[in-house]
Amino acid sequence: MQQKETNSTRLGYSKKEASKETSLSIRMLDYYISMGVLKAHNYGSRVIISGKSLQRFIEHGPIPYPNKEVIQHDQSA
C-alpha cells in the first residue's frame, strides 16, 4: 500500500506542535530560533514558528538564515 505524499505546509506551528512534528524538544527549538535557524513570530507570550522555515529545516538541516530575527508583534492594535 502506498502512502500519499502531501506538499501542503501549514502557515505556522506552536512550539509544542513543531516539537511533535520534528521530534525535537521545545528547548532545542528555542535554541534554533535564537540561532536564526528557524523563523518565529512572537504574539505576546505565544510563539509561532513559520511553516516554511520548519519545512526548510527538515529538508536541509540546521542552516541559519542570513539575518536571524524573531519578530515581535504589538498587541495594542
Image: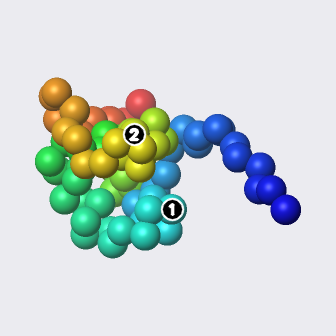
- Mark 1 is on which residue type? Glu
Q: Residue visible at 22% across and 41% down? A: 63
**Residue 60: quarter of image:** top left
Q: Classify the position of the C terminus by image quarter.
A: top left
Q: Residue furthest right?
A: 1
In this figure, which colouring scheme has been used for the structure? rainbow
Residue 9 is situated, as x and y percent measured from the top left of the image, at 59, 40
Q: Is residue 35 left or right of residue 17?
A: left
In the rendered structure, which amino acid carries the disc numbered 2?
Arg
Where residue 21 appears, as percent x and y from the top left, is: 51, 62
Where on the picture, by quarter, is residue 73? Answer: top left
Q: Identify which residue, 59 or 23, lies in the foreground.
A: 59
Along the horizontal axis of the image, is 17 left or right of 31? right
Q: The N terminus lies in which quarter of the figure?
A: bottom right
64 sits left or right of 47 in the view: left
Residue 15 appearing in the image = yes
Circle 1 sits on which residue? 21
| Residue drawn where x is 44% and y is 62% of the image | 22
Q: Which residue is mark 2?
A: 56
